[in-house]
Image: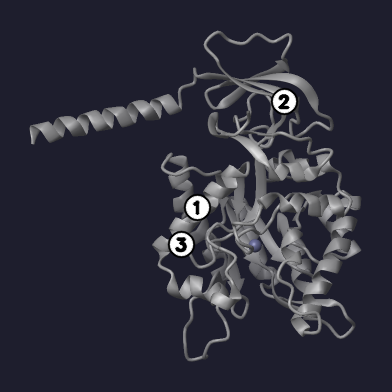
Amino acid sequence: MRASFTIACITIASLFTSAQERKSPNTVTVIRAGTLIDGKSDSPRRNQLIVIRGNRIESIGDDAAAKVPPDATVVDLSKATVLPGLIDSHTHIFLQGEDPAEGGYDVNILKYPASLRAARATVSVRRALEQGFTTLRDVETEGAGYGDVGIKQAIEGGYIPGPRLFVATRAISTTGGYNLEGYAPELTMPKGAQIIDGPVEARKAAREQLDHGADWIKVYMTHRSWVGKNGELVSQPTLTLDELKAIVDEAHGWGRKVACHAYSGIGLQRALDGGCDSIEHGLQISDAQIAQMVKQGTWYCPTIAVYYTDWAPADTDAGKRDRLRASVHEDSFKKAMKAGVKIVFGTDIGGIPWTQPIAQEFPQMTKLGMSPMDAIHSATSRAADMLDMTGKIGILAPGAYADVIAIAGDPLQNIEELGRVQFVMKDGKVFKNEMH
Ligand SMILES: [Zn+2]
């Protein structure tokens, strides 16, 4: 008994020491950056020295003039391009791009134990970090309840590697407004989102989710979509304005924000009139709606790449809809960009498999006319602004958390270089270094 007691004490003591070491404010790391893109400025700087104390950036200056503190660990990235850790503002760590041939979305909810889904989510977050995404806004667990809160706790506790997570937990939609569907009406099927009808239920759902750890509330304002009589994209609206307003009022009272999935039409209009903070996807946005977004300061997370995958055959109704979605989406993105809507980088990854590169969204944005630097800002300082983390993440500047990545090439010449991240530091700790 005594021996095991001693061992237990030593174990606890060593755990405590390592936890203290992790947070030590005095550990100094210095990064020599050949090219530095800070996430906010319009142009890069050459030969900079980043001094990191603990988990924060202490200073950045010209390498030639700056002094390396005597006890510092030096990381030589003098031949690389150094950027802030990237932010994906639309992910689903509890989805795996389920293949319809293998049962699609439904098997995840009907057949997989929560532990299996959590194990796969653990792999998803690791993949994101490996690719240089040090922050994710994860916009609902698709039937995995509050699993995202647990994964976030596991990352913050140092049990598993992963990005900083902003989680939305269960999401909210209405009766007839979410999967699972198409089963016998006699069966009560589980749903991928929390279903509400009426402003009272809407407010209660928001309160429950906020109480259990939601950083954001995610609302589905449209559900099915199809090609209308005149060849236009039609989307089925879900929540009424009163239902949405109850949620937005509740979330804002807690100092939290509301992300609205909205494709087009009535549902998108209600999202804007109800005070949504961010429009997700926004496939077909009218000129008047774009003006309203500018006026209200609504964020736009377009998630372009995902609408180019898995098109149904061209001669089917679904295939026509898929092609229409992509073409109206391109127009909306271009018009929103021109009007000065605040656009953030988001992929909807999880809706597509986590084996696909997250950075594939960057060339989609630049192909539609966004400059490479603007695309980088959409995944750094602009996303940080949306997350109320201005100056703390998405930027390389004194006082920011030391979330730093590096690539060998120049992303301003070739945006696809962002798909080849070779160095990742999160919160002052090196997670990956393949720079030679
Ligand atoms: Zn999504």
**Label 2's element?**
strand
Out of 193 and 68, give the one closest to the viewer.
Answer: 68
Q: Which comes sooner in the sequence, label 3 or label 2?
A: 2
Residue at point 60%, 76% (across, down): 100
Using the image, determine if residue 367 lies above or below residue 79. below
407 vs 372, left or right, is left
16 vs 81, left or right, is left
Give me the disc on residue 380. none
Q: How far apart are marks 3 and 2 (CA)?
A: 40 Å
224 vs 162, left or right, is right
In this view, which residue lies farthest toward the front?
A: 436
Badge nearest the viewer, 3 or 1: 1
**Label 1's element?**
helix
Out of 53 and 209, give the one closest to the viewer.
Answer: 53
* Residue identified by numbered label 1: 123
Give me the disc on residue 117. 3
Dot 1: few (<14), some (14–19), or many (≥20) neighbours within 10 Å?
A: some
Q: Which comes sooner in the sequence, label 3 or label 1?
A: 3
Using the image, determine if residue 436 lies above or below residue 138. above
Q: How far apart are marks 1 and 2 (CA)?
A: 31 Å
* Residue identified by numbered label 2: 79
Out of 239 and 374, give the one closest to the viewer.
Answer: 374
Residue 225 image position (x, y, % from top left): 74, 77
Using the image, determine if residue 114 lies above or below residue 418. below
Residue at point 62%, 11% (across, down): 68
Badge nearest the viewer, 1 or 2: 2
- Amino acid type, residue under disc 2 in the picture: Lys
Q: In which image quadrant can residue 265 be found?
A: bottom right
Quick check: can you spot residue 164? yes
- Amino acid type, residue under disc 3 in the picture: Arg
Residue at point 37%, 28% (across, down): 18
